[in-house]
Amino acid sequence: KDWSRSAGMSSPFCPSYAPFFGFMGAALALVFGNMGAAYGTWKSAVGLSTIANLPSKSVQTEMVMKSIMPVILSGVCGIFGLIIAVIISSNMNAAKYSLFSGYAHLGAGLTVGLSNLATGLALGMAGEIGVQDSARQPKLYIGMVLIWSFGSALGLYGLIVALIIAVKPGEALCDCTYDGDVVTCGE
């Protein structure tokens, strides 16, 4: 039985279940992005809190404030996931939402979500040790900033690719129908 036709939909390319994939993309973008942000913040904050155990004469006070950088960069992971989730959800149209759009939005959500999960893992691991070591030896700080920057660039790459994927139009497919082996569009 052709469920898309029986539900009153004119196109088999726009079934009623297509928005599920878009909503999953939005949810996964936010969930994985926030998981990366939480992990990166947690591990970096653990490194920051261990500075308190170092002898006060060996820690420069300005290094404590500089050591907040991996925590801030980790928080950006969640923001990137939120951006894509908002873009996906604002492009949802129940009347004209194709499987193409659903799969594109799912792909965009997974792209930004998993990229920012990886970013959070990288920033958390490098942040914890980097904060401790740069507090002991301030000359290491510039090198640690470079490592944190390259780690956080992974999330930015995921955001850029997800933006490109998420804005692909697929609504025109809702005007296409089957007639045997022939697909007609725009009638």
Image: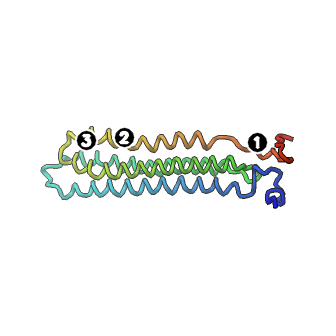
Q: Which residue is mark 3?
A: 141
Give x and y (percent) for residue 36. Answer: 43, 54
Amino acid type assigned to the residue bearing label 3 in the image:
Tyr
Amino acid type assigned to the residue bearing label 1 in the image:
Ala
Could you tell me which secondary element the residue under label 3 belongs to? helix
Q: Nearer the viewer, residue 164 or 107?
A: 107
As drawn, 120 above or below 154: below
Q: Which mark is residue 81?
A: none
C-alpha span from label 1 to label 2: 41 Å
Q: Which residue is mark 2?
A: 149
Q: Residue at x 25, y 41 (%)?
A: 141
Side of 51 relative to 42 (left or right): left
Number of other residues with Cα within 10 Å of mark 1, as a class: few under 14, some 14 to 19, many 20 or more: some
Q: Nearer the viewer, residue 64 or 76?
A: 76
C-alpha span from label 3 to label 2: 12 Å
Q: Which mark is residue 172?
A: 1
- Contact? badges 1 and 2 (CB < 8 Å): no
Amino acid type assigned to the residue bearing label 2 in the image:
Ser
Give x and y (percent) for residue 185. Answer: 82, 41
Give x and y (percent) for residue 103. Answer: 64, 49
Number of other residues with Cα within 10 Å of mark 2, as a class: few under 14, some 14 to 19, many 20 or more: some
Could you tell me which secondary element the residue under label 2 belongs to? helix
- Quadrant placement of the C terminus: top right
Task: Tell me the colour scheme of the image.
Answer: rainbow
Query: Nearer the N terminus, badge 3 or badge 2?
Result: 3
